[in-house]
Image (cartoon, rainbow, N blue to C red):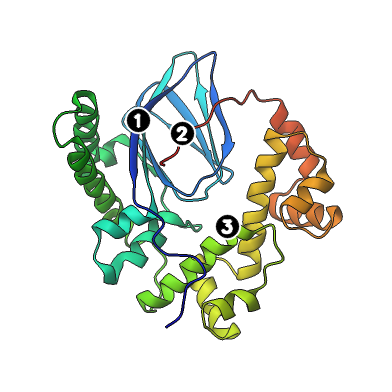
Amino acid sequence: MRKPFVEFREGAGTNFFSNVLTEQRPCFMLHTHSVIEILYFTQGLHRVVCDGVDYIAEPGDMLLIRSYTAHELFKEGRENAYHFVLQMTPSFILSISATEASASYILALSFSNNNSKCLWKKDECERLGLDKAFESLIEERKNMGYCYDLTRNYLVAQITSIILRDTKDENIEVNESEELKRRIYDSMIYIQRNFAEDITAEECAKNVSLSLYYFSRSFKAIAGRPFKKYLNFVRITHAKQLLTSTDKPITEIATACGFNSASHFIVTYKENEGTTPLAYRKTSLKKNRVGGYPLVE
C-alpha cells in the first residue's frame, strides 16, 4: 500500500475566541496558517484582504479563510471593530465526517480557487441559520458550562455543514475517487511545507504513485491551478510575509522561498502580482501592522 509522505491526519482540534481592533491596534499583519479560520463580525467595520482580494465586513457578516490563505485585517472608521474567530484543523473535519466524503470536504474548506465563496453577508447568515449557530457558540463560550467542549464541537460541525452545503455548487467538481483527491491533497500540503526546496511535478507524482501525466491533469482539476503555478503561488505568498514582516534583502527572500535567483524571483513576482517585490514592500511599510492570532495547538 502507498505510504503517504504527508500524513493525512494532522491532529484534531478547534479553537474559538474573541478579538478586537482598536486605534492602538488597528490591524493584523499579513499571515497564513494551516488551520481553517472563520470570522464572525459583531461590531464596527472591518476590511479583510484574502490573497489580495478586499472584503468589507459589517456586523452580522461571516468570512471563511481557507488554509494557507494569505490574509490581513484592518479596522475601518473610528469605532472599535469586534469579531469572533473560529479555528479548526483539517483533521477535525475528518473526525466528524464520513470517511468516503472527507477528502472532498477538506479540499472545499482548505483550498480556494477563483470561484470560491469567502464572505456571507448578514442576510445570508440569517437565512442559513449561521447567526443562530454563532450566537449559541458565543453563549456557550461565555458560560463555559459542563460539556462545553462537546457542545462547541457540535456547533462547529453545524456551521461547517452549512458552509459546505451552501458552497456545494461552487466547489471544484472532479469525477475522481476520494483516494485520488486525498493524494492530490497530500501533494498540496507537501508543497506548502517544502516550498523552499527544489520541488518538481515528477517528484510529487512519484511520491503519490501516479504517472506524471495523470498527476498533472488531476492536480490542475483539483487544486484549480497547474502544478507550477500553484508552486509559484505558494512561494510568492510566503515571500509577501517576509517582505512585510522583515527587512531581509530581496536576494535572501528569494532563496528562502525557493527561487533560484533574485532575478527569477522578481520576474515571477511581477508576472503574478503586477508589481515588484520592492514596490510591494514600500507600499506595505506605509501601513501600520501589528498583532497576530493565536493558533490551535
Badge 1 marks a residue whose secondary structure is strand
Residue in the image at 54% along x and 20% along y = 26
Residue named by callout 3: 192
Residue in the picture at 28% in, 50% down? 160
Q: Is residue 185 above or below residue 246?
A: below
Q: Where is residue 10 in the image (x, y as percent from the top left)?
A: 41, 56
Residue 130 in the image, given as x and y percentages of width and height: 24, 40
80, 114: nearer the viewer? 80
Mark 1 surroundings within 10 Å by alpha-carbon count, few (fewer than 14), some (14 through 19), many (20 or more):
few
Circle nearer the N terminus (1, 3): 1
Q: Residue 157, how many percent across, how many down?
A: 24, 49
The residue nearer to you, when weighing 259 against 217, is: 259
Q: What element carries label 3?
A: helix
Q: Crowding at label 3, few (<14), some or many (≥20) Cα neighbours within 10 Å? A: some
- Callout 1–callout 2 Cβ contact below 8 Å: yes
Decide which of 62, 34 is in the foreground and name it. Answer: 34
* Mark 2, secondary structure of its residue: loop
Residue highlighted by disc 2 = 294
Relative to 266, is 121 above or below?
above
Say whether disc 1 or disc 2 marks the residue closer to the N-terminus. Answer: 1
Amino acid marked by disc 2: Pro
The residue that label 1 is drawn on is: 17
Decide: is 201 above or below 36: below
Q: Give the amino acid at mark 3.
A: Gln
Q: How far apart are marks 1 and 2 (CA)?
A: 9 Å
| Residue 139 circle label | none
